[in-house]
Image (tube, rainbow, N blue to C red):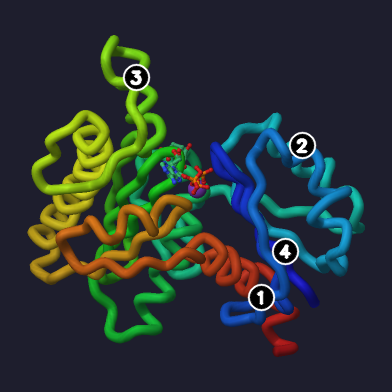
Amino acid sequence: MTFLALDVGNTRLKWALYEAPRPGARLLAHGAQFLENIDKLAEGDWSTLSPPDHVIGCVVAGDAVRQRVQEQLEIWDVTPQWVVSSNEEAGLVNGYDHPARLGSDRWVAMIGARHRLLGQGPARPCVVVMVGTAVTVEAIDADGRFLGGIILPGHGIMLRALESGTAGLHVPTGEVCDFPTNTSDALTSGGTFAIAGAVQRMVDNLRQHSHEEPKVYMTGGAGWKMAPSMSIPCELVESLIFDGLLEIAQQRLPVLKMAV
Ligand SMILES: Nc1ncnc2c1ncn2[C@@H]1O[C@H](COP(=O)(O)OP(=O)(O)OP(=O)(O)O)[C@@H](O)[C@H]1O
Ligand SMILES: CC(C)(CO)[C@@H](O)C(=O)NCCC(=O)O
Ligand SMILES: [K+]
């Protein structure tokens, strides 16, 4: 009973094929493709995969992109399920004003994080940071309620905004340092500290709210670049969205759950 998990972001589509639709299942194959190249998945990366029995994904890139992904999935006899953020799923309660308007990638990553947290020890508040095209920082209380979160530009968007809005900021990528003394380092450190500072603030907010030290998880394509610059302990988990999709799959496919 193989399971294909899809994470369709604003820059790239990430996919992972698992042996079964349940947490901890063996990873059989995985990959990523920039959105401009996804129309070649069926004749490329996916052509040699054994056909998945189930497909569940999250898409934040819009209906046109989702349509293009569905066309690629037509090589198999499978109907994909797309996650829509709801009031409650897989043990997480959604505090958003309009739950369905919460980006499904955020929702799924939080489900992954919550289950990881519970697997690591007693329930406690947690902050989930996703560093992709955009950056999101979410707060979840010890009971598993999503209290709220923030959205800010990712590294790439911050840099492009500065480049297009100024005359003199076209420079190569620099290094992150405490006291930058050239334009490249100043821009790279500025973007990194903007994100690190936002995370720190959310951790402060949640600590104050819950009177307990929050656990911090970080994920997303640029998470590995961000993690070393964090001033607070933070666990980098590349697979948080896939982990969430596996939890959702297990809950949505109860027949399979009984068979395990
Ligand atoms: N090596 C790098 N140097 C500078 N910026 C980078 C680098 N790698 C990634 N980025 C930037 O980080 C951001 C996120 O990267 P990436 O596309 O890998 O994340 P993602 O999680 O796949 O995004 P999404 O899910 O939104 O599609 C992008 O804005 C990208 O420009
Ligand atoms: C914020 C992003 C772009 C992060 O990928 C995505 O989750 C999204 O488009 N969200 C919809 C708006 C919201 O979450 O409030
Ligand atoms: K994403």
CB under 8 Å between callouts 3 and 4?
no
Q: Residue at x 40, y 34 (%)?
A: 156
Real-space Cα separation, disc 1 to disc 2, in angstroms: 25 Å
Q: Which mark is residue 185?
A: none
Question: Where residue 229 appears, x then y in whole percent?
Answer: 23, 56
Real-space Cα separation, disc 3 to disc 1, in angstroms: 40 Å
What's under tag 3, amino acid-wise? Glu
Of circles 2 and 3, the one toward us is: 3
CB under 8 Å between callouts 2 and 3?
no
In primary-sequence order, the first of circles 4 and 2 is: 4
Q: Which residue corresponds to mark 1?
A: 27
In primary-sequence order, the first of circles 2 and 3 is: 2
In primary-sequence order, the first of circles 1 and 4 is: 4
Using the image as rendered, state which of residue 235 and residue 142 is in the foreground.
235
Q: Residues within 10 Å of mark 3 (few under 14, many from 20)?
A: some
- Dot 2 beta carbon under 8 Å from ligand 1: no
Q: Which mark is residue 4?
A: 4
Q: Residue at x 73, y 41 (%)?
A: 38
Real-space Cα separation, disc 3 to disc 4, in angstroms: 39 Å
Question: Where residue 218 appears, x then y in whole percent?
Answer: 35, 60
In primary-sequence order, the first of circles 3 and 1 is: 1
Real-space Cα separation, disc 4 to disc 2, in angstroms: 17 Å
Q: Which mark is residue 68?
A: 2
Q: Residue furthest top?
A: 167
Q: Residue at x 30, y 47 (%)?
A: 149
Residue 240 in the figure: left or right of residue 17:
left
What's under tag 4, amino acid-wise? Leu
Q: Which residue corresponds to mark 3?
A: 163
Per the image, label 3 sits on a secondary structure element best described as helix
Real-space Cα separation, disc 1 to disc 4, in angstroms: 10 Å
Relative to 66, does residue 78 appear above or below in the rendering?
A: below
What's under tag 1, amino acid-wise? Leu
